[in-house]
Structures are given as structure tokens and as C-alpha cells.
Amino acid sequence: MKIGIVCYPTYGGSGVLATELGLGLAKKGHEVHFITYRRPARLGHFHENVFYHEVTNEDYPLFEYPPYDTALASKLVDVIRYEKLDILHVHYAIPHAAVAYMAKKILLQEGKYIPVVTTLHGTDITLVGANETFSPVVAFSINKSDGVTAVSESLKQQTLDSFEITKDIRVIYNFIDFTRFRKSDKDHFKKAIAPDGERILTHVSNFRKVKRVEDVIQVFKRVNEVIPSKLLLIGDGPERHNAEMLCRKLELCAEIRFLGKQDAIEELLAVSDLFVMPSENESFGLAALEAMACEVPVISTKVGGLPEVNLHGKTGYLSEVGDVEDMGRNAIEIIKSEESLQKFRKNAIEQAKRFDLDKILPEYESYYEEILRTAVHPDKRPVDSPY
Ligand code: GMT
């Protein structure tokens, strides 16, 4: 199959998932074309069957906002036409689903029908999409997609609750590549971070408000008062400054390391003892799954799709948003003894295996096949069809 993939090329979860999906499909022999404004972060080097098309934008003094949507639609038309793609898979509804619809309509004029699959990732529905600045276009373009998937049951339900959706939404969970994410015993690495055998707590995110990074620090403070620990904060974003200020105020800078954006997150997760995700909203929590694959239990909130990933009392614990006391207590409960930690570690990896790439990738492949079989070419529709 020849598949086009559109996503945000940044460190956000949707871009990571889309890139891993494309790489997995390419390994299985599909031809995969990424169409993005920058090379996706995880597309580091040459891969067989993988092609990358950069969307370039034109600047002009009239444009206060260069029209990225138009540039992307034009690029899609060109790539789909020239590379003869079979299907287009766009990740994150805004603006990708609407742009895909535009490209589809343009190509229809020349008799080419390209089915579009839209994957909803979270904030495209819960935070940004539901806002009336975008909602009419989001609802329209979801309904005009040939196939729609959501990364958790919770996100599917939230989509149905927030918009008038006429399309069936298929839940296909996010996945994990176990060849990359697994526990390792890099002792020298662990020693450098925690020279006196302290426990290592880790948080990975894009440091947006929704991630509540300050809660991570508050949880860490409570843990560190009882069990000597270190905290690794991985990623960067608008909330980093506030987080650094809080570390200084709490006089915890010696115990907390801000590592910024990292490519080899798996190496850091692999030496961690606990992952902390106190988000206000999380459709799935891919970073938590990556931790669990490395046998790291998770302290998280019980929002969105997190209860589908992190099982309370088994792979970690779930708390109310902002309840740092509860999260602190739960964290201590997990790491208080080697016996307890090992039990949670074992459960974490067992649960992570449900989301193995080798299980989930075929779900996408058969969904594509289903869409290719059932999407109705306009020639075959009644003449008065509105499509
Ligand atoms: O977490 C973010 O804010 C990034 C965002 C994205 O779209 O890049 O992540 C969303 O998609 C991920 C992949 O499906 C999910 O694992 C995250 O839970 C989801 N984030 C939120 O819902 C806040």
C-alpha cells in the first residue's frame, strides 16, 4: 500500500505516534510518505520505503499569518498525484483533517479519489477543537473523513459528547515498540544520576499548562522527604520557567535535573523507578506507556484515557487532578521497598504488552483495507449525493 502521513513533526505525542506508525508500516513493506513542515523528530535517518516531503510556505508582506493550510493542501495534491498514493492518514484534526478534505476535493476534479483517515489524538478535541474558534471546521472535517480513529475509548466518547458526529469512530490504541523501549541495566548511567542509590523519578512532556509540571515537583518534594530521590524532567515548553522557579523556591535544585528535549528518552526511562504524569487532561498518555514498557510504574491523574493505560493499584496509582498529597503517598507506597517496586514493575510491563506495536499495527492495516474497500468513489454515488 502507498500511504501518505500528515502530522506535527514536533515532540508531541501525536507526531511521535504518527512517525512510529509510518516506520512500522514501512518495515512491513508499505511505501510511506511523510508530508510535514519539518522532518519529524523520530525520523532521524534513512529508512527503506520511507519518503519525506517538506511543506514549504511562501512569505509575502501581505501575510501576517503565512497560509500554512493552503501550502499543505497544495503539497498533498502534488504528492498524492505524483506518487499515486492509495490512502492519506492525517494525525491531529486541526488543521489536517480540513486540509485533507480540500486536497481530496481538488483531486476529485481530475478523477482521483483518495480516501482520508483522521486520527484524533486528544487536544484537537478536548482543548483546542472544542473551542468555537475551530469547532465547526473540526466537526465538519471529522464527518467528511472516510475513516476516523481515536486513541482511547475516553477520547471517542469525548468526541461524541462535544460534536455532532455522524461517522463511526474506531478506537485504535496507541502502541509501543518493545525493541526500543525496554529496561536496561546501564549502571554507569544510573550512578551518574543517582550516585548514592537514590530512587529516580521521571517526567516527560512538552511542558504545557495541561501537563501540570509544578505538580510533578510537589509530588517529588513529598517523596524526597521520606525516600532520598532524584527527579529527571525531560522536555521543554512554556511552563519550564515556572517549574525552575518552583525548584529554586523549594530549594530542590540539587535533586532535580532539567534535561530539555531528548531523543533517546528510552535510555532515561530504562533507569527510572517511577514515572509521574499529573496532567489535567490526557487522551491516552503515550509517555506513560513508554515508561511502562521500560518496567516503570506510573503515578498519574485519573483523567481521560489514563485509566485505560495505568491500572490503579497494579501498574501504578490514579489520583484526582491537583491532589499532590495523594500522588506523593502513592509514589512512596510503590518505591518504599524493593519488593513493592518489583511487583509494580512486573505489572507495568505486562499491561504495556497489550499495546505492543506488533498487535496494534495490523489493526491500522486492516482498517486501511476496510476503508479502501468501503469508501465510496463519487462515480458510484447517486447523482444527488452532497459529497
Ligand atoms: O500531550 C500533548 O499535549 C501532545 C499531544 C499531541 O497531540 O501531540 O498528545 C496527545 O496525543 C498523544 C498521542 O496520541 C496522547 O498520548 C496524549 O495523551 C495526548 N495529549 C493530551 O490529550 C493532552
Image: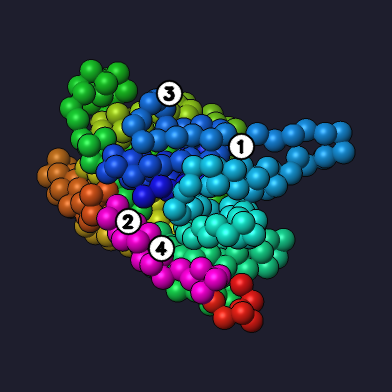
Q: Amino acid at mark 4?
A: Leu
Residue under label 3: 254
Residue labelled 3 has its Cβ within 8 Å of some atom of ligand 1: no
Foreground residue, 149 or 146? Answer: 146
Badge nearest the viewer, 4 or 1: 4
Measured Cα–Cα span from mark 4 to mark 1: 26 Å
Q: Looking at the image, is mark 4 or mark 3 earlier in the sequence?
A: 3
**How many numbered circles are shown?**
4
Is-magenta flag for residue 110? no
Residue under label 4: 372
Foreground residue, 307 or 157? Answer: 157
Q: Element at badge 2?
A: helix
- Please say if 65 is above or below 354: above
Measured Cα–Cα span from mark 4 to mark 3: 56 Å
Specify the quadrant that holds the C terminus: bottom right
Q: Are marks 2 and 4 in contact (CB under 8 Å)?
A: no
How many C-alpha atoms fall within 10 Å of the one at disc 2: few (<14), some, or many (≥20)?
A: some
